[in-house]
Image (spheres, grey):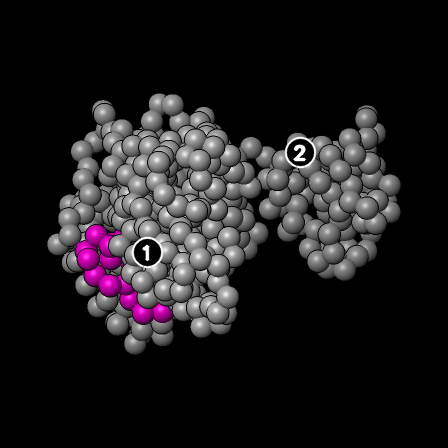
Amino acid sequence: MPHKITAVLPESIAEQLEILPGDALVSINGQTVVDWIDYEAFCCTEQMSIVIRRGDEEIEYELEKDEYEPLGLQFETQLMSPVRNCANKCMFCFVDQLPKDVRPSLLVKDDDWRMSLMMGSFVTLTNVSDKELDRIIARNASPLYISVHATDGALRAKLLGTPLGSKIMSQLNKLKNAGLSFHAQAVLCPGVNDGEYLKKTVEQLAALHPACLSLALVPVGLTGHRDGLCELRKYTKAEARTIVEEVAKWQDKYLKKFGTTFVSASDEFYVTAGVRIPSDERYEDYPQIENGVGLMRLLETEMEYAYEEADLTSVRPARFVDACGVSVAPFMKSLFRRFEIPGVEVEVVPIENHFFGPSVTVSGLLTGSDLIRELKGIDADKILITECMLREFEDVFLDNLTLEEVEKEIGIPIVKVGRTGDDLMNALLYA
């Protein structure tokens, strides 16, 4: 299917060839272009033949260029094709647990390996046929981020609600044999895919190292909107402690065997267990920080460096409220005590999540209505929130309230803080 060209970049090869917006890309080097992945792969060559459709006419261009020099074409969508939806019925699916009045975009279930390659999102591969897996290999799509959850085929099919889930080990072995790499995650449900099943998962994925670069263990997230869904529960303190103790043993083992800790638990496991998060060295280069693995450790490490370099002699006195999730509140309190700034007072206020339910305790899922409920009437010069609460590139919360609306309702300026320790230190010093 030809892809409509929406723009031609100035001074690009396409402009020199007099390709125009409104034209359509038919093929490159005689091959049909399925999507952006194909387009990028086919363009990485010095000798090219491209076919453009203009009206009823097809025009063929032969050209030479530098191997990685772009053509300069833009298309209607980033992927040049629709996003592929999820084919699973996972017993722990977070989308199925959302309130009815959540914004429609949050109800979209995508499971697209191309977004995994481009954005680092996790995919299950259940909607990837053998032919498509061959295309992944042919395009050298690596590293991918793969939701494994369990390597036992029958259990994974049960977890994902589809028999297609049982194919995972053959898919991963095929990627390994082709020289591709991937990061893996396992969302753990108490009494379902932990215990001996988890031991098997860790061992089988470790056997795929170095193709399998890392494995993150994440506790299941449960909201207060599970009517009609299967019975699941959160991890107890004792169970979480067992997980982090096992992770420490596996890390010691694989550090000796591979030179890498390989497997890590998300911060939430350590918070639930009441155990101090591991040292910076244990997280190596933080390969799964977007999965909540090492966020707290990296924030503390970055704060330490920022604090050492900060000029604390001329700081303006100020009173801040740090509004955060219930689970991270004790950590934030210890952070502000350790890096105390003369004249700057910080009160940490844990915000209970009414929108998703009190069982959701992370900062990133707090809403504008939650902040208004808990902070209206509080005494502060400014309120600090993490930018993770807001939609990317927009000042909009998950309940569709804008930052401006929430700020007006509370009556105190709100400062959105970036994810790094430097961002937090700068907010305290200069906001």
Q: Quadrant of residue 66?
A: bottom right
Q: Residues within 10 Å of mark 2 (few under 14, many from 20)?
A: few
Chain-order first, disc 1 or disc 2: 2
Q: Is residue 215 visible?
A: no
Q: Is residue 261 above or below residue 383?
A: below
> Which residue bears the numbered disc 2?
76
Residue placed most toward the observer, 302 or 8? 302
Q: Is residue 340 magenta?
A: no
The span shown in magenta is 260-280
Residue type, numbered disc 2: Glu
> Which residue bears the numbered disc 1?
332
Q: Position of residue 274 (x, y in %)?
A: 19, 57
Name which residue lies at 47% across and 50% down: 417
Going by the picture, which residue comes out furthest to the left? Answer: 238
The N terminus - image quarter: top right
Q: Is residue 111 above or below residue 22?
A: below
Q: Is residue 369 above or below residue 297?
A: above
Q: Quadrant of residue 211?
A: bottom left
93 sits left or right of 107 in the view: left
Q: Position of residue 118 (x, y in %)?
A: 54, 49
